[in-house]
């Protein structure tokens, strides 16, 4: 039985930004919760620090470690028993663990997105990560409605967590206060905030290769990819690698294409200078992916010729070769009497 390499690749590589989202969210929650707990200790009316609930004659550094340990435990609880409690963690009103509320909320968002992603994967029927069907499936994800809903959920959760942290830092919520200003919060947790925004936007912007990847031959081909590719290379990067090989094949060097895509015919895969430099293929690619798919179906997977207007690249050889291809087409086409 062949191992489900497509599923492994999808979970490990294609969805890695979801795991970055979770790690960044938990980092932000931890930093905010630790600071809130420290503020409560610092604002205590007690003058004898040895009698305070958390300090117990420990140094400030040890106190912070104790608070971090308490926060880590509280993140896995929604309510905390007032009698048992957690050392160095004071729950919100009515025993509610705010760290747990935000953490479980993050887990729910991630689980919702993973459920959507896995349902789409199951519908694709892909099993081999080297297959063209799997490649096309990942390149089409951006156009799937359920995927868009999942991405929007991630983006809304990102906005809620970041704005929530800043609101808490202003002290407008009774009983919850940070001992730092919004500006200091930004300095403390800006990396987690940037990673949250980056990871959610990365799931939205799926890059498609600059050639006619909806050609049935692309989906029918089995590509040459090794074990390291299965756990390191995403399909967007492989698509660009394939585009480079197709371009070189059109220039006469077919070795790379024969190696990574045995049997794939590049003769009808046009890559103009505009396509290669910007990643936008022909005029139909100016449509969104769903419209492009319908466009290609209506035209029986035959795309219109790629124009060269407004095309500019750094490599003159690519530009010249594109022009020579168009000239060859015009010379080989039948002339009317």
Image (spheres, grey):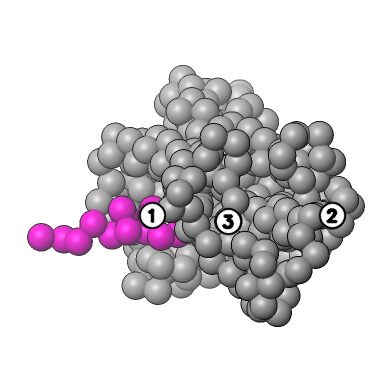
According to the image, label 2 marks what residue? Answer: 180
Write the start and end of the magenta stretch as one range.
1-15
- Mark 3 Cα shell of 10 Å, populated few (<14), some (14-19), many (≥20): many
Mark 3 lies on a secondary structure that is loop
Viewer can see residue 87: yes
Queried whether the magenta region covers residue 249, the answer comes back as no
Q: Which of disc 3 and disc 2 is earlier in sequence?
A: 3
Extreme residue in the left direction: 1
Q: For marks 2 and 1, give the CA distance.
A: 38 Å
Q: Give residue 11's mark.
A: 1
Decide which of 117, 162 is in the foreground and name it: 162
Which residue: 58% across, 61% down?
88
Which residue: 60% across, 41% down?
92
According to the image, label 3 marks what residue? Answer: 89
Q: Which of disc 1 and disc 2 is earlier in sequence?
A: 1
Residue 185 position in % (x across, y down): 81, 54
Which residue: 61% across, 23% down?
337
- Mark 1 Cα shell of 10 Å, populated few (<14), some (14-19), many (≥20): some
Residue 36 position in % (x across, y down): 71, 52
**60 shown above or below 130:** below
């Amino acid at each position: 039985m062949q191992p489900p390499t497509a599923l492994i690749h999808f979970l490990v590589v294609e969805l890695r930004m979801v795991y970055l989202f979770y790690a960044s969210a938990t980092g932000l929650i931890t930093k905010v919760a630790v600071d809130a707990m420290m503020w409560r200790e610092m604002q205590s009316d007690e003058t004898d620090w040895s009698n305070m609930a958390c300090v117990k004659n420990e140094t400030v550094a040890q106190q912070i470690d104790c608070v971090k340990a308490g926060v880590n435990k509280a993140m896995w609880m929604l309510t905390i028993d007032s009698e048992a409690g957690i050392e160095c963690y004071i729950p919100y009103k009515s025993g509610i663990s705010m760290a747990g509320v935000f953490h479980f909320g993050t887990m729910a968002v991630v689980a919702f997105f993973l459920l959507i992603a896995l349902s789409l994967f199951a519908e694709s029927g892909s099993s081999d990560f080297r297959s063209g069907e799997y490649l096309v499936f990942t390149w089409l994800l951006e156009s799937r409605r359920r995927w868009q809903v999942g991405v929007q959920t991630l983006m809304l959760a990102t906005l809620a967590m970041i704005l929530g942290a800043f609101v808490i830092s202003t002290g407008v919520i009774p009983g919850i206060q940070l001992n730092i200003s919004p500006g200091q919060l930004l300095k403390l947790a800006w990396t987690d905030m940037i990673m949250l925004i980056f990871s959610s936007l990365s799931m939205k912007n799926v890059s498609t290769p600059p050639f006619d990847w909806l050609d049935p031959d692309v989906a029918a081909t089995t590509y040459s990819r090794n074990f390291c590719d299965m756990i390191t290379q995403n399909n967007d990067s492989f698509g660009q690698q394939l585009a480079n090989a197709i371009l070189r094949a059109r220039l006469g060097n077919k070795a790379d294409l024969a190696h990574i895509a045995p049997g794939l015919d590049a003769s009808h895969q046009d890559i103009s200078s505009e396509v290669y430099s910007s990643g936008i293929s022909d005029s139909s690619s100016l449509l969104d992916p769903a419209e492009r798919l319908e466009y290609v179906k209506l035209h029986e997977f035959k795309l219109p010729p790629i124009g060269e207007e407004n095309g500019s690249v750094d490599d003159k050889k690519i530009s010249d070769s594109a022009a020579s291809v168009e000239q060859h087409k015009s010379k080989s086409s039948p002339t009317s009497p």
